[in-house]
Amino acid sequence: MTTRICLSLLLALALVSCAAKDQGKRYDMQGRILALDPAAKTATIDAGKIGDWMDAMTMEYPVKPDSEFAKLHVGDSIEASVVVNGDKYYVTGVRVVAKR
């Protein structure tokens, strides 16, 4: 019985560890919303340098979840997090710091 409990705990720890890796790395972002695509839930953001991931540039970002996308308006200045997992990325944790 003790062996089963130990194996179950080890399996649970391994699964938690794998799930944490799937969430990707988070970077702070500051930028300005230039365009929104409600159908695709993406925002074109003129952002400053994003950690060691990307230099300052304007590009389209998926925004997750929908409640974060709903906060955005063209012209808003924002602070947010960019989550990067391999070649996939998205913006979340949006805070509007200046309205359009």
Image (tube, rainbow, N blue to C red):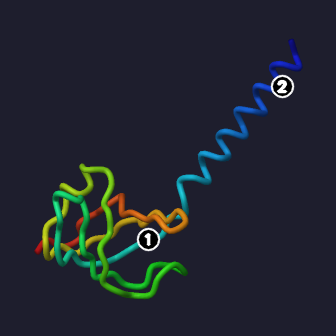
- In this rendering, would 71 be left or right of 65? left
Residue 15 numbered mark, or none: none
Residue at 17 percent across and 68 percent down: it is: 36
- Residue 82 picture location, percent across and down: 42, 66
Report the quarter where the N terminus lies.
Answer: top right
Q: Using the rendered view, name the quadrant where residue 49 is placed.
A: bottom left
Q: Could you give the CA–CA distance between mark 1 and mark 2, rounded to whole angstroms?
A: 39 Å
- In this rendering, would 30 be left or right of 49? left
Amino acid type at mark 1: Asp
Amino acid type at mark 2: Cys
- In this rendering, would 9 be left or right of 41? right
Residue 6 numbered mark, or none: 2
Of 74 and 11, nearer the camera is 11
Report the quarter where the C terminus lies.
Answer: bottom left
- Whichever of callouts 1 and 2 sits on the residue coming sooner in the sequence is 2
Q: Is residue 5 above or below residue 37?
A: above
Q: Is residue 83 above or below residue 56?
A: above
Residue at 24 percent across and 59 percent down: it is: 41
- Residue 25 picture location, percent across and down: 55, 64
Q: How packed is label 2: few (under 14 Cα within 10 Å), some, or many (20 or more)? A: few
- Residue highlighted by disc 1: 28
- Residue 51 picture location, percent across and down: 50, 79
- Residue 55 picture location, percent across and down: 44, 87
Q: Using the rendered view, name the quadrant where residue 78 is placed.
A: bottom left
SS of the residue at dot 2? helix
Q: Is residue 27 above or below residue 92?
A: below
Residue at 36 percent across and 63 percent down: it is: 91
SS of the residue at dot 1? strand
